[in-house]
Amino acid sequence: MNDSEDREIPAYNCPICKDTGWEEVKNGDYVAMRECRCGYMQRQRIAGKLKFAAIPKEFEGHTVENFQTNCYASESSRELAAMAKTIAKNYVEQFSEIQETGKGLYFYSRVKGSGKTRLAVSIANDIIQEKMISTKFATTIQILDQIKATWGGMSKNEETEQKLIHDIVSVPVLVIDDIGVEGVKDWINERFYNILNGRMIEKRVTIFTSNCKIEELQFDDRIVNRIVKMALPVQFPDESIRTAIARKENSELLDRLLGT
C-alpha cells in the first residue's frame, strides 16, 4: 500500500464544494465560481442573522408552524391561541407587503407563561429563515440596562447612548418582550419615546409582548399613541401553559429513563 492510499480521505458534507460554499463552473476556456447548489453560503448567512437576533436558547428552532394550541386547558383559550397562530402565520406569509407599512403585532395576556413570547420569537425565526431579514430580540429590561451601561459621567458616553439608540431604531424587525414591566420614570419614558418614535418614522417593524393592553401601559400618551399606530393588538389566553408543558416534558423524560 503506497503513501497516497494510506492518507485518510477527508469526509465532506458536500463533495462538489468540499464545504467551502463555492463550486466551479466552466465557461468555455474559463472557470468561474458561484455559490454551491448545496446552499452552504445561504445557511451561513442565516446562522449569522440568528446569532445577531439574540434569540434565547429556550426558543431556538421554534416556528409558527410548530406552535401548539392544544396544550391549553379550556376551549376558549385554545380558540384564542389558534386565532393568534393564524394571524402569525399569515403575517409571515404576507410580510414582504406588510413590512412596507411598518406594522407590527402586540401580543398581550394578563398571565405570564401564556405563550406570547414563544409565538413572537417564532415569527422572528420564520422571518430570518424565510425572508433573510435581520431581527433582534430584547426584553425592555435588557434595553434599559444597555442604555444605562453607556452612562459614565463623560461627554463621550452621550454619543455612545445615541449610537445604541440609533442601532435599536435601525434594526429591520425588533421583538420587544415584556413591555410594561419597567418602572415609570421620566428617563425611561424619554428613551422609549426616542426608540419608538424613530422606528415609527422609519416604518420599522416592531413586535411587542406584554401583560397588559396597550391603553393600560404606564407610559406617557406619546408612547402609547405610537404603539397603537405601530402594532395590531392580538389577545392571548389568560392561561399559563409553561407549567403544563414542563410537567409533560418531565413525564416523557421519566418514562424514557424508566424504559416504559
Image: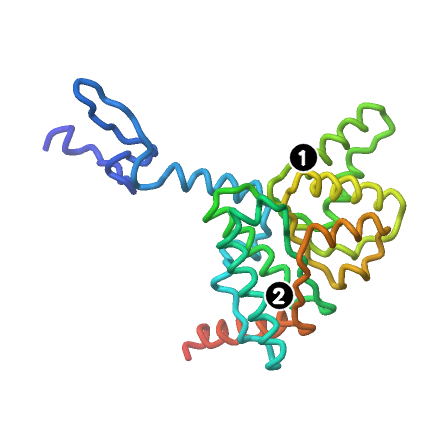
Which SS class for mark 1?
helix
User: In this rendering, would 137 be left or right of 9?
Assistant: right
Tell me what residue is drawn at x 62 percent, y 76 percent. 77
Q: Nearer the viewer, residue 56 or 174?
A: 174
Residue 32's x, y, as percent?
27, 23
In this figure, which residue is indicated by the disc labeled 1? 167
Categorize mark 1 by other alpha carbons within 10 Å: few (<14), some (14-19), many (20+). few
Residue 235 location, quadrant: bottom right
Which SS class for mark 2?
loop
Please report whichever mark, 2 or 1, sits nearer to the chain's N-terminal start: 2
Q: Is residue 195 above or below residue 180?
A: above
Q: Nearer the viewer, residue 4 or 135?
A: 135
Q: Nearer the viewer, residue 143 or 213?
A: 213
For badge 1, the amino acid type reads Asp
Residue 258 location, quadrant: bottom left
Tell me what residue is drawn at x 11 percent, y 29 percent. 2
In this figure, which residue is indicated by the disc labeled 2? 115
Question: What colour scheme has been applied to the protein in the rendered image?
Answer: rainbow
Dot 2 and dot 1 residues touching (CB under 8 Å): no
In the rendered image, which quarter contains the N terminus?
top left
For badge 2, the amino acid type reads Gly
User: In this rendering, would 5 be left or right of 240?
Assistant: left
In the rendered image, which quarter contains the C terminus?
bottom left
Residue 189's x, y, as percent?
84, 46
Residue 129's label in the rendered image is none
Tell me what residue is drawn at x 55 percent, y 71 percent. 82
Q: CA distance from mark 2 to mark 1?
A: 28 Å
Residue 96's x, y, as percent?
51, 47
Tell me what residue is drawn at x 78 percent, y 37 percent. 149
Q: Is residue 201 above or below residue 152?
A: below
Categorize mark 2 by other alpha carbons within 10 Å: few (<14), some (14-19), many (20+). many
Residue 237's x, y, as percent?
66, 72
